[in-house]
Image (cartoon, rainbow, N blue to C red):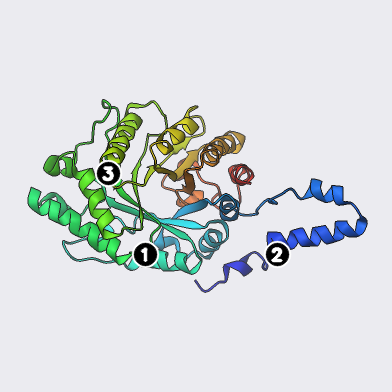
């Protein structure tokens, strides 16, 4: 991106290991070995979100919009703080296959190539969703729709084969406020029935056997909610029948007062089914210490469950957030770190 992100903050910081050696040498000269043990605990604190998450083998990612990549501070913050990325809209159906059989990947490729150059994990988002569909999809017959579904998965996953860590194969298929297991009405259910989710996952496994395949949804943060139970039962059924599924994505679009008390229990119950859990679209409306505490609780819940493999915040700065009026992210509109940022970093460390 022109500017070297390492120099944006005024030069390259010494690695944690280097700092430990310098401290050890100075303290050793003073003969204060006990002071060393007290001042530099095992696994000295990492200074960025990605580095802190990596200490436990996790990632800390951000949703990125290609349209903001001309903002040098945006890119520098992404490069410095995060070790994973989810393209915000650039891999959705309307962006990648605007007309049938005609694929375009320019904007998504821009994000992917930058992330690859920085060694970041990349989450693909999303292959099958009821929203942001080009109009031609809804006009297809059942036979054509099934063919288009498989063709779309094959082409998009094929284009990025070997580059994507995990795919949100199906997004937001369950209904809000319905009985357990109710799917939302969509072109998919209307023409393919409830089996479309299984069809999509089987097609995805064939298209890229090495990518992790995730089901992703919102309002499945409370372990006992009907929507959560529906997803849980589906995953349990898929695992029992050998339908390929590797992870569940909790979007976790929350407010500072709405983190469920059983959030960690919820992560653990999905993990117990034999899938990874990823917090995929985290943002928490609020401010100050209350917002910070909510972010801390979510982070601690993930790090407490070994199969919670990473967290992605849905954006970098409040000014570009889809819910900017709620100021839900870790950096304010001027890229200043908020109290929530410090809470997350401390929890990861």
Badge 3 crowding class, 10 Å Cα cut-off, few under 14, some 14 to 19, many 20 or more, is few
Query: Which is closer to the viewer, label 1 or label 3?
Result: 3
Dot 2 and dot 1 residues touching (CB under 8 Å):
no
- Compared across the picture, whether 139 is left or right of 343 comes to left
The residue lying at 18 percent from left, 44 percent from top is 188
Rounded to the nearest angstrom, the CA distance separating label 1 from label 3 is 23 Å
- Compared across the picture, whether 326 is left or right of 177 comes to right
Is tag 1's residue or tag 3's residue first in the polypeptide sequence?
A: 1
Q: Which mark is residue 162?
A: 1
The residue lying at 34 percent from left, 55 percent from top is 89
State the image coordinates of residue 268 (x, y, percent, origin top left): 46, 34
Tag 1 secondary structure: loop
State the image coordinates of residue 262 (x, y, percent, origin top left): 48, 28
Residue where numbered disc 2 is placed? 14
Which residue is at the front of the view, 177 or 119? 119
Tag 2 secondary structure: loop
Badge 2 crowding class, 10 Å Cα cut-off, few under 14, some 14 to 19, many 20 or more, is few
Rounded to the nearest angstrom, the CA distance separating label 3 from label 2 is 48 Å
The residue lying at 54 percent from left, 62 percent from top is 79
Residue where numbered disc 3 is placed? 242
Is tag 3's residue or tag 2's residue first in the polypeptide sequence?
A: 2
Rounded to the nearest angstrom, the CA distance separating label 2 from label 1 is 32 Å
Asked whether the viewer can see residue 66, the reply is yes
Badge 1 crowding class, 10 Å Cα cut-off, few under 14, some 14 to 19, many 20 or more, is few
Which residue is at the front of the view, 245 or 219? 245
């Amino acid at each position: 991106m022109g500017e070297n992100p390492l120099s944006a903050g005024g030069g390259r910081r010494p690695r944690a290991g280097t700092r430990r050696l310098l401290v050890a040498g100075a303290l050793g000269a003073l003969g204060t070995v006990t002071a060393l043990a007290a001042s530099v605990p095992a696994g000295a604190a990492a200074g960025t979100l990605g580095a802190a998450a990596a200490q436990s083998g996790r990632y800390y990612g951000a949703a990125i919009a290609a349209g903001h990549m001309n903002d040098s501070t945006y890119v520098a913050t992404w490069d410095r703080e995060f070790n994973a990325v989810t393209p915000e809209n650039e891999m959705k159906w309307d962006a990648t296959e605007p007309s049938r059989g005609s694929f375009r990947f320019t904007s998504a490729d821009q994000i992917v190539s930058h992330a690859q150059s920085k060694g970041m994990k990349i989450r693909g988002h999303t292959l099958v969703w009821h929203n942001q569909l080009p109009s031609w999809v809804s006009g297809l017959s059942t036979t054509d729709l099934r063919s288009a579904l498989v063709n779309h998965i094959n082409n998009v996953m094929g284009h990025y084969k070997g580059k994507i860590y995990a795919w949100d194969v199906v997004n937001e298929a369950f209904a809000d406020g319905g009985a357990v297991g109710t799917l939302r009405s969509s072109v998919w259910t209307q023409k393919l029935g409830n089996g479309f989710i299984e069809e999509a996952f089987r097609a995805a496994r064939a298209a890229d056997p090495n990518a992790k395949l995730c089901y992703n949804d919102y309002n499945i943060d409370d372990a006992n909610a009907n929507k959560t139970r529906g997803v849980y039962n589906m995953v349990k059924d898929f695992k029992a029948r050998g339908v390929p599924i590797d992870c569940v994505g909790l979007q976790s679009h929350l407010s500072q007062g709405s983190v469920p008390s059983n959030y960690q229990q919820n992560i653990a119950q999905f993990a117990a089914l034999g899938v990874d859990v990823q917090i995929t679209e985290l943002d928490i409306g609020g401010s100050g210490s209350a917002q910070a505490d909510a972010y801390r609780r979510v982070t601690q819940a993930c790090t407490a469950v070994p199969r919670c493999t990473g967290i992605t915040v849905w954006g970098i700065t409040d000014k570009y957030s889809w819910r900017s009026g709620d100021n839900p992210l870790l950096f304010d509109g001027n890229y200043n770190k908020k109290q929530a940022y410090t809470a997350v970093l401390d929890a990861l460390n």
